Amino acid sequence: MTASSQPTRSGGRPYAIVWSPIPLISWLMPFIGHMGICSSSGRTYDFAGPFTVNEDCLLFGKPTRYLTLGPQAAKQAAAHSSGARSAATTANPPHSSCCCTEDPEAAAGRPQAAAAQPADLSAVSATCREGEVGVGAARLEASAGATRSASTAAAAAISPHSWDHRLAFAATTYRLMQYNLMTCNCHCFVAHFLNQIAFRGGGWDMVNLAALVFLRGRYTSLGGLLHTWLPWVVLVALGGYFGRLIFLAIYLALCVPLLAWFLVYTWCCWRDLSP
């Protein structure tokens, strides 16, 4: 582990999403927890309550899971779209006039006797073909240059200053908002920040963000793994042993409606503040 990836006092890591279990709720449903986002130095930010965004102090203690984000993936959508616009413009430069196009004024002032003279059609045709080849080569070169420019812009990483500035701006925005576990929570705050920097093209919400951390998040240590799963395993084992089908029915009656609510609300009702 490099020095830059060492956890901070609050357990954060640079450019990382951090996650910690919520007592009782995460013991029943381990896919639900508290989420925060880290600055370039590993300082944690989490939406912890009405008009409250904590800094360097997660609401439910040090995180047990984290997912380091690649800052180079931020702003790729903006770079790609600008590169595409540049390619569309440069790939179709103004059409060069062919030598066989005649100036009307010059034709009007030309003596009628000269107009009657036979033109060298083979020379005119060859010159036109050379002009078309030159225009085509210019278009190909311009398109290749635009593609290289777009690739370079997309590969450029967001600077630490920009990352921290956007994070501070997102924290200021959510310090003006009410907190609601069901509609406006810590996941919304992290999703808002990722949409602000267009991380992987944006489009983040509570559901895909929770799924990302749940499926790809790493554990901070063996203790973090046990802290995340041991209460749930013990509860399910005891409930299944003593309650059997009754416990299963109660457990599903709690989990399924809650999961359905988050899916329906996120996809049908929730709107991020990002433009």
Image (spheres, rainbow, N blue to C red):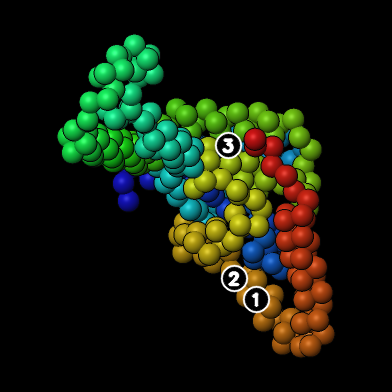
Q: Residue at x 29, y 30 (%)?
A: 100
Looking at the image, residue 241 lies above or below residue 167: below
Q: In the rendered structure, are the residues bearing label 1 and label 3 in contact, judged by CB atoms less than 8 Å apart?
A: no
Looking at the image, residue 110 lies above or below residue 128: above
Using the image, tell me which numbered label, if any, was put on residue 268. Answer: none
Instruction: Left or right? Give the position of 96 relative to 49.
Output: left
In the foreground, 246 or 182: 182
Neighbourhood count class around disc 2 (C-alpha, 10 Å): few under 14, some 14–19, many 20 upward: some
Is residue 98 visible to us here?
yes
Location of the C terminus by quadrant is top right
In the foreground, 102 or 256: 102
Q: In the rendered structure, are the residues bearing label 2 and label 1 in contact, judged by CB atoms less than 8 Å apart?
A: yes
* Cα distance in 3D space between marks 2 and 3: 36 Å
Using the image, tell me which numbered label, if any, was put on residue 230. Answer: 2
Tell me the quarter of the picture where residue 151 sits. top left
Outermost top residue = 109
Q: Residue at x 53, y 41 (%)?
A: 198
Residue that label 3 marks: 196
Mark 3 is on which residue type?
Answer: Gln
Mark 1 is on which residue type?
Answer: Val
Neighbourhood count class around disc 1 (C-alpha, 10 Å): few under 14, some 14–19, many 20 upward: few
Neighbourhood count class around disc 3 (C-alpha, 10 Å): few under 14, some 14–19, many 20 upward: many
Residue that label 1 marks: 234
Of the numbered discs 1 and 3, the one sitting upstream in the chain is 3
Percent coordinates x, y for residue 16 in the rendering: 48, 46
Tell me the quarter of the picture where residue 93 sits. top left
* Cα distance in 3D space between marks 1 and 3: 40 Å
